Image (cartoon, rainbow, N blue to C red):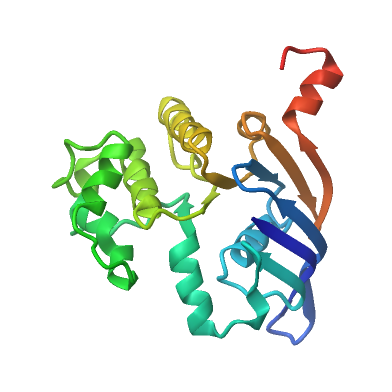
Amino acid sequence: MIELSDIARTYTRPSGEPLRALSGVSLRIERGEFVAVVGSSGSGKSTLMNVLGLLDPPSEGHYRLDGQEVGALSLDAQARLRNKKIGFVFQAFHLLPRASALENVELPLLYSDRPSIDGLGRRALESVGLADRLDHRPAQLSGGQQQRVAIARALVNDPDVLLADEPTGNLDARSAREVMALLQTLNAAGRTIVLVTHDAALAAECGRVARIEEGRIVADERQARRRAATGEEQ
């Protein structure tokens, strides 16, 4: 589903000095995997997420998404691919405060080339357990409910990949568990999910953990192998 080969990303500081945020990153993610990318602040995990989401082009290397070489596409073609294939969930929700839950969820459909979009927003909200909150504005919802609206928005175009950047970072413990359970349910139904987090406990609930330090992948383990190695039940 996702193939990164020797990806590097270099920025230029205001002083003119180069800042290398990613260096030689190679990563292959199969369809249906649930992968946590773990790293401390400044490790490069958010830059990696931006590259995966076609928000930030790599300076070097190759990125293939569902068999397509991303670097060979125009910016417009990349935008269409992003809208069709990728859904985003962010720590800060990014909901429009004056719009209802349904209106927020339907926003990505404005750029969709689907022949019919009737009912898609409603069904997306139903899938995250918010069928009774269609007309509520963000201020009328709890933090956990707002994040579920954001997840519904990410799902409304039925993307192949869900990218979640610290999705529980602004939530209390109970809401965080509910959101994580929802992501696990989506993955069990076949959705490919990449979750960026600094929380080792949260990452442990994913099927695979890739650790990034100073812009490089330094470890990549499937959880079943870790449990087998420690003698725990798989």
Residue found at the very far front of the displayed protein: 115
Quarter of the rendering containing residue 224: top right
Q: Is residue 112 left or right of residue 189?
A: left
Residue 212 locus on image (x, y percent): 77, 51
Q: Nearer the viewer, residue 155 or 181?
A: 155
Q: Nearer the viewer, residue 3 or 14?
A: 3
Q: Is residue 145 left or right of residue 38?
A: left
Is residue 142 in sight in this rendering? no
Task: Determine the residue positioned at 36% across, 49% down.
Answer: 150
Residue 147 locus on image (x, y percent): 37, 43
Is residue 181 in sight in this rendering? yes
Task: Determine the residue positioned at 18% across, 53% down.
Answer: 100
Q: Nearer the viewer, residue 123 or 206?
A: 123
Q: Is residue 134 left or right of residue 115?
A: left
| Rendered position, 44 above or below 111 | above
| Rendered position, 214 above or below 227 | below
Quarter of the rendering containing residue 74: bottom right
Residue 56 locus on image (x, y percent): 61, 73
Q: Quadrant of the N terminus?
A: bottom right
Q: Nearer the viewer, residue 13 or 82?
A: 82
Mark count: 0
Task: Determine the residue positioned at 45% across, 42% down.
Answer: 170
Task: Determine the residue positioned at 64% across, 74% down.
Answer: 70
| Rendered position, 204 above or below 5 | above
Quarter of the rendering containing residue 22: bottom right
Residue 217 locus on image (x, y percent): 81, 52
